[in-house]
Amino acid sequence: MDSPSQTRHISEENAQSISRVEELAYVIRVDEVMSRDPKVLSPSMAMSDVLEMLRRDHISGAPVVFSSDLIGIISLEDLIRALVAKDLDAPVSQYMTTTNILTVHASDTVVEALKIFSKYNVGRLPVINENGSLTGMITKGDITRGILNNLQKDFQREEVRRYRASHLFEDIISDRSSLILRYNIKKGDFTRGGNASSNIKRALVRLGANQQIARRCGIAIYEAEMNLIIHTTKGGIIRVEIEPHKITMRAVDDGPGIVNVELAKQAGYSTATDEIREMGFGAGMGLFNINRCVDKMTLESEPGKGTRLEMKIYLQPEESVGDTSYHYGDRT
Amino acid sequence: MNLQQIIDHLELKPLTQTQDFSQVEPKSGYTADLLSCVMAGAKAHCIWVTLQAHVNIIAVAALLDMSAIIITEGAQPDQATITKANAQSIPVLSTPRSTFDIVGELWSLGLRSIETA
């Protein structure tokens, strides 16, 4: 027979959800998942009443409270001691444990409770507020339930978001629907270089584009974005038009323009300054990379006027974005 | 070979926030200091060895879905680079050793320019 370790596989998805669970343990607060108004005992109650309560409520212990302060705890062990001594008429105060009472604070994250559970091998903990008053009880089950609820919410949020975005065009009837994203790129803004391309890539994934398409667009836009940052007089605009069967990307600026367009397209040809090259730009690969990533590239430029770069990626029916009902025959 | 093992073996110093590096499995390696070359040549889930340290390396790594960046020769990225790397969850690792040495080590650990295994 296979041992569990041989038959169990942790997929990448599992690994992700494990780390999300761990993350949640550091986010969810004790008072979000604890049970409020717990069963409590008073110090003057008889041990026989404790026995009755534990049996009735199927619990293995309860906190002892005097004027809302937690003063002790009764566990099964304490009850057994009273039983063995045939002393069930004695008050709770005589048998309760008063030293080293384990508690968590209401405002702690549940990971603190989990640490105590595993260190002391207990199953429930009294929860106290900043004044030391008992406000609830927390069990491992409460924590599991809280984490599952949060995961469920995460999952629904993501599903809703994905569903909405990937069906963007389906209920909108027109002869031609498209989504246009615009980004203003500033000259010399190296710190924000790559922001437009990252945002476009993320938008495409959300619209249902596969990784390969999103990556090709990301690379093409990145190069166009850096060209605007490095080479233009005042910067420029990137405009991305997304249609179910086609992505059209345009980078437009108003100067200084390219003297020799054919030369600019060649790999290794660069007009960048030494300073730009030191940063790792200006390899003369930009337009070459773009050409490699897109299906159609058109470059128009006039010295003194500006440059207009258009890039198109055509999508196969199974790659369509924003419309999962799109079929090849519908192509316009 | 996961990223934690690579970090331990090459004595790399993580500059980004701690995460479970043993969950990251680089599939290939790449080296170049010209960003457009990287854009053209690096594969998804690769580990990129470079001496560039400015903020744009993070944009490149994120666009290409890289597993990690190793910055060689002790080049110091500024805070903007680290902040962006943390936001994009791209591990950035530092070493005083040369790119040549680091690439040699990664090769001997089994990494190649295209996905192996």
Image: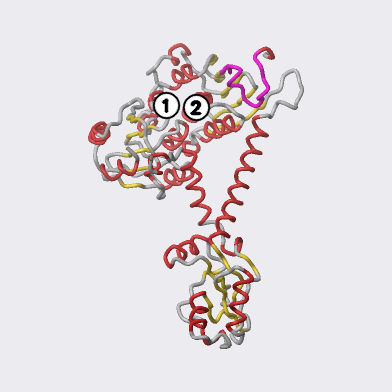
Of B54 and A319, nearer the camera is A319
Indicate whether residue A314 is drawn in magenta: yes
Specify few, some or many for label 1: CA neighbours under 10 Å numbering under 14, 14-19, or 20 or more: many
B10 vs A177: above or below: below
The location of residue A113, given as percent across then percent down, is: 50, 64
The percent coordinates of residue B82 (x first, y second) are 42, 45
Q: Which residue type carries mark 1? A: Met
Asked whether residue A332 is drawn in magenta, I would say no
Between residues B96 and A157, which one lies in front from this camera angle?
A157
Q: Quadrant of the N terminus of chain A?
A: top left
- Can you identify the residue that label 2 sits on? A215
Residue A232 visible in the shown view: no
Callout count: 2
CB within 8 Å, label 1 to label 2: no
Nearer to us: label 1 or label 2: 2
> Which residue is pictured at 30% across the width and 28% down the height?
B112
Q: CA distance from mark 1 to mark 2?
A: 10 Å
Q: Nearer the viewer, residue A203 or A42?
A: A42
Q: Amino acid at mark 2?
A: Arg
Foreground of the two, A187 or B78: B78
Question: Disc 2 on helix, strand or loop?
Answer: helix
Q: Secondary structure at mark 1?
A: helix
Q: Residue at x 40, y 27 (%)?
A: B43
Q: Is residue A12 left or right of residue A155?
A: left
- Quadrant where the C terminus of chain A lies? top right
Report the span colored magenta: A312-328
* Circle number at residue B39: 1
Question: In x, y percent, where is residue A5?
Answer: 38, 43
